[in-house]
Amino acid sequence: MKCRCGKEAIIHLRPYRLSLCDSCFVDFYERKVRRFIRKWRLVEPGETVYVAVSGGKDSAACLAVLQQLSVELGIDVAAIHINLGITGYSEKVEDACRRLCRMLDIPLEVVNLVDAYGVGVEELARSTRRSACSVCGVVKRYLMNRVPRELGANRVATGHNLDDVVEFFFKNWTSGNYFWISKQKPLLPSTHPKVLPKIKPLFERSGLENEMYVKARGLPYEADECPHAVTSRWGEIAELVEERAPGFKLAFARGLEEIKIVAPEPQFTQCSVCGEPSSGDPCAFCRILRAAA
Ligand code: SF4
Ligand code: ZN
């Protein structure tokens, strides 16, 4: 497999019918992300963007590419990581985040759930009798908004990739969760003065592209998955379709960007415990903390 420049290719991008070497791929990737950010006006000059880093390849790619484009976009980039207190896993992903941010010279804020609230995700799951991923989602949504806002962020960026976008759509569509699907957009504007806009700069980039980008730039990431991660059959189904029809996921995501799915927005009230905006009182985060107390 040869790149168009004649060097050995490291990746074949089936949707684009393109084989690229490491340096041509890095150029290609950054060009695509730059164009996507500009098309959807994901950032404005002068803003500070906090990237939610998990230690994995996708958020590492998101942080690295935003920093690479930061001068021309006129933005400051910082990172936030939440140590979820997951046995045998959280320590090593925090370490990967610290190494990544040191290498990129990006300020990193780490919130340790056990230190800050006295309880980790697994204990919260046990006491609420919910799955670890369900309480983890509540914790991340809450802290990834509150902490960056208190640190002066204008936006929060996440490393959601093309595979996540397609899988998430099918999973939620078939369960009738249209509200969540309506949130599956490159930019989620703020719906309350205390709610930061959320951006997904890698909406059209596959997990493989993100992995190759961090590898081509020699950046550290943790390849092991969280012990609570489950393989989604919708992810597998989307992959099967992609194999038969290369470019399916990209076309699908582009359709999702354009269509408007209207789902009723919850009315905001203020949590009487923590003061954060919420659709109920107390908010979901304070409710699960209370259950574990
Ligand atoms: Fe949280 Fe579940 Fe992801 Fe683990 S797999 S980090 S518990 S959402
Ligand atoms: Zn609260």
Image (spheres, helix red, strand yellow):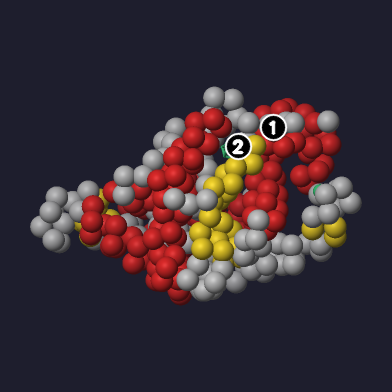
Ligand 1, image quadrant it occupies:
top right
Which mark is on residue 260?
none
Q: Residue furthest right?
A: 272
Tell me: residue 140, above or below residue 18.
above
- SS at mark 1 in the image: helix
**Image point (60%, 63%), residue name:** 155
Query: What residue is disc 1 on?
Result: 114
Residue 209 appears in the picture as rendered: yes
Image-based side of 228 in relation to 98, left or right? right
Task: Give neighbour class at mark 2: few <14, some 14-19, many 20+ (Cα, 10 Å).
Answer: many
Q: Check the image and name the residue furthest to the left.
A: 6
Q: Amino acid at mark 2?
A: Asn
Q: Are marks 2 and 1 in contact (CB under 8 Å)?
A: yes
Q: In the displayed image of the protein, which residue is found farthest to the top?
A: 88
Q: Residue at x 53, y 55 (%)?
A: 78
User: What residue is drawn where x is 14% and y is 50%?
Assistant: 8
Task: Identify which amino acid the numbered label 1 is placed on.
Answer: Val
Image: 244 above or below 110: below
Q: Earlier in the sequence, mark 2 or mark 1?
A: 2
The quadrant the C terminus occupies is top right
Residue 107, position as x, y percentages in the image: 52, 51
Front-most of 55 and 127? 55
Q: Which residue is mark 2?
A: 83
Q: Who is closer to the viewer here, 269 or 23?
A: 23
Horizontal and vertical percent for residue 2? 13, 53
Q: What element does badge 2 sit on?
A: strand
Q: Mark 2 to mark 1: distance in Å?
A: 8 Å
